[in-house]
Image: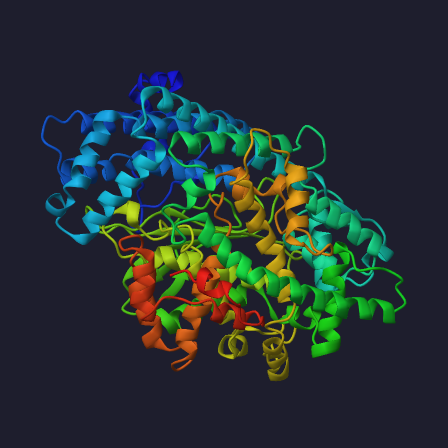
Amino acid sequence: MLMLVAAVAMPAVLGATNPLLAPWSGPYGGVPPFDKVKVELIKPALEAAMAEKLAAVDRIANDPAPPTFDNTLAALERSGRTFDRVGRIYGVWTSELATPDVRALAREMEPRLASLDDRIVQNGKLFARIAAIYEGRAESCKTPEQARLAWRIYTWFVRAGARLDPAAKKRVGEINERLATLGTSFGQNVLADEDGYVLVLKEERDLAGLPLSFRSEAAASAAARGLTGKWAVLNIRGSVGPFLTFSDRRDLRETAWRNFVSRGDHGDERDNKKIVAETIALRAERSRLLGHETYAQWRVADSMAGTPERAMALMEAVWPAAVGRVREEVAAMQAVADAEGAGIAIAPWDYRYYAEKVRKARYDLDEGQVKPYLQFDRLRDGMFWVTGQLYGFRFKPARGVPVYHPDVHVWEVSDGAGKALGLLFIDPWARPGKRSGARAVALRPQETMDGGVLPLVAISTNFVRGRTGGPNLMSWDGARALFHEFGHALHGLSSRVTYPSLSGLGVADDLVELPSQIMERWLWTPELLDRFARHYGTGDPIPRDLVEKIDRTSTFNQGFATVEQLSSALVDMKAHVAEGPRFDAAEFERTTLAGLGMPREIVMRHRMPHFTHVFGSEAYAASYYSYIWSDVLAADAFEAFTEEKGPYDKAVARRFQERVLSVGNTVDPAEAYRAFRGRDPAIGALMRRRGFAEAGPGAGKARPD
């Protein structure tokens, strides 16, 4: 609190001298001044922007005029323009360029940013005005979108504690600041373990089984770390996954696997288990203060699921079929290992390796056959082509747009008539200091409050770059990840709303993955593969028989993929309904998985000590189930295409864009889906897509209607 008061008193000259505080200038309605960012400028810019926002909020709260939509809610939407701009830049640096000085900055600023939110939420005069507009919205709001914004802001304030007494508000503020500190430390610990636990291959025999493309990538990764003449398996999914798939060295597979699954769990100063325990306890305490029995209940209340029980019902309807499929997959792999005389029982570091052998034997297909046809640049152009076919979007390189790293490239997105719709930033390659995983973020949301504002959307992934001058080849999983994040970007670029708080990606947690997961489906289409899957050496298109083999493997290994992800979602949800003041992350993980009947050959996709989705922030806390929930929607929605003229049916695409992608949070998500599909979604399409038997009695309960 005191630090924010100090920020208010900072000299006004900062606004004139710090380029991060100026309105964005340049083409496309202004672009982020990435070329002017210096780490030492970020803190004073944040402090000045925070002070400006608080002053604007105070003016709204103390306005002597009766509250109206324009002088309260619309004014609140405008109040944080500078803060929003600076905050987006800060977010890029802490996520994509986390040097030691940036990490130190985040440790200092995250609690202060949490405190800023609390000061706004706990402003009693402001909330009284918001509540008056919400309660009288039939008269105070002139359009359905204004009424939706009134609901959204009022609900956010209530959920954050606006109606609490002073003592409870104070305690919630303390908890929020502490959680911000814990989340920052958690993420930085994981990043340090990813940077620090690199498996270095020193001899030719260490490369046994590895395809040339992986060797090239590993050599480039080693050279970037000053290890010329060696090969490096980075401690990130995009490097460890292929190594586990192809390496003949079981001992090295085990080492790579243990490095990866033990991130944040080495019993050292970066061990995250105590952070998990404290985070769980603080979230539970805060939820009780806010009137909910558990954190999960609080978190899910304004989602499509509505209750933890409905989210659990969906997961429990899918879980038995997924575990049953895993048993079949393991039996097939064990048979291969036995036939080879391996003398082993399939272990977690063997799963991908022997699954690949089964795929080759069963379908005459291995990933090594496919990867030479999956070049990053061509697949990127392919996803642009798909979007043109479906929605009429066009992409061309943008000129004069600063970037925050040389890896980043920018595209102008326009409609068929050439009208600019926004910008897409793509940052594809792994590097030290870059947060792992893949993500899409809005650098600026679309809005039309005060004239049209173009959306600026960024995709960040962690693909491993090939050697200099060589091709950048991708695994099939990597290609899916690219299309997935592009689906999020399309959601932001398609937005056509008035108010920024309702724009693009700002939807319910369990709807936000629908656009990304349905976009993955187009990667499988022959129309795309025929045009853009070209051999890096010859330029020849991918053979038709290889495309057919890929299609036949669409349900292959779905037991592994589903159990890996669903176990993380179940542990996440169960952890956030756990009772008791003490929480032992290691014991809870063990006992919960045992109770679920977790196959011993698989580990959670995200174990608790490195589950940054849940403990690095609250983005997916008690909400990781949203991936399976949204995939029910995506599978059902894609069948709308196949029931008509096929994946490239423009009429269905137009309906999906108009009724789902473009509406943001201006309508209830269930209503938006019904407007597109003509009915509620059902679980059957998901089960068919994954090759599982239709769910039994639980299916009706699981349906996200």
The relative height of residue 700 versus residue 430 in the rendered view (above or below) is below
Q: Position of residue 629 (x, y in %)?
A: 46, 58
Total labels: the figure holds 0
Q: Position of residue 348 (x, y in %)?
A: 74, 55
The relative height of residue 269 versus residue 447 in the rendered view (above or below) is above
Q: Residue 229, can we see it? A: no
Q: Position of residue 690 (x, y in %)?
A: 56, 69
Q: Residue 188, can we see it? A: yes
Quarter containing the N terminus: top left
User: How is this picture coloured?
Assistant: rainbow
Q: Is residue 612 left or right of residue 588?
A: left
Q: In the depicted view, which residue is nearer to us: 567 or 383?
A: 567
Residue located 85% across and 56% down the image? 204
Q: Position of residue 219 (x, y in %)?
A: 73, 53
Quarter containing the C terminus: bottom left
Residue located 33% across and 32% down the image? 21
The relative height of residue 233 versus residue 37 in the rendered view (above or below) is below
Q: Quadrant of residue 413 in the image? A: bottom left
Q: In the depicted view, which residue is nearer to us: 698 or 151?
A: 698
Q: Is residue 29 left or right of residue 97?
A: left
Residue located 43% across and 69% down the image? 636
Q: Is residue 639 left or right of residue 378?
A: left
Q: Is residue 206 left or right of residue 193?
A: right
Q: In the depicted view, which residue is nearer to us: 263 or 179?
A: 179
Q: In the depicted view, which residue is nearer to us: 532 or 362?
A: 362
